[in-house]
Image: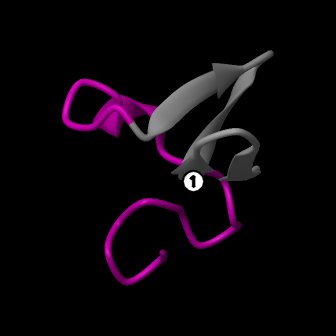
């Protein structure tokens, strides 16, 4: 995820990319990346 630019060096999900993909969702003050959105939501926080 770091190499693709989704997370920073310290492991924080980059919320500025939220307008590019539906897979970034807000989680309180941070962001999560959705891996699977079916009967159960699986995301990386």
Q: Which residue is mark 1?
A: 36
User: Could you tell me residue 1's position as x and y percent?
Assistant: 48, 75
Kindly identify the residue that appears in the image at 76 percent across and 42 percent down.
Answer: 40
15 falls in the magenta region: yes
Kindly identify the residue that appears in the image at 59 percent across and 73 percent down.
Answer: 9
Residue at the limit of the structure toward the front, as seen here: 39
The way the protein has been coloured in the rendering is one colour
11 falls in the magenta region: yes
Which of the 4 image quadrants contains residue 32? top right
Residue 6 placement, left or right of 45: left
Number of residues whose C-alpha sits closer than 10 Å to that of mark 1, classed few (under 14), some (14–19) or many (20 or more): few
Kindly identify the residue that appears in the image at 52 percent across and 62 percent down.
Answer: 7
Residue 41 placement, left or right of 28: left
* Relative height, residue 27 to residue 21 (above, below): above
Q: Main secondary structure of the magenta part?
A: loop
In this view, the residue in front, 33 or 10, is: 33
* Relative height, residue 42 to residue 26 (above, below): below
Residue at the limit of the structure toward the top, as seen here: 28
User: Could you tell me residue 5's position as x and y percent?
Assistant: 35, 66
Q: What span is in magenta?
A: 1-22
Residue 25 placement, left or right of 12: left
User: Could you tell me residue 6's position as x and y percent?
Assistant: 42, 60
Which of the 4 image quadrants contains residue 27? top right
User: Which element is circle 1 on?
Assistant: strand
């Amino acid at each position: 995820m770091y190499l693709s630019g989704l997370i920073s060096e310290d492991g924080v999900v980059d919320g500025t990319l939220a307008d590019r993909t539906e897979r970034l969702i807000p989680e309180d003050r941070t962001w999560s990346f959705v891996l699977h959105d079916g009967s159960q939501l699986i995301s990386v926080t």
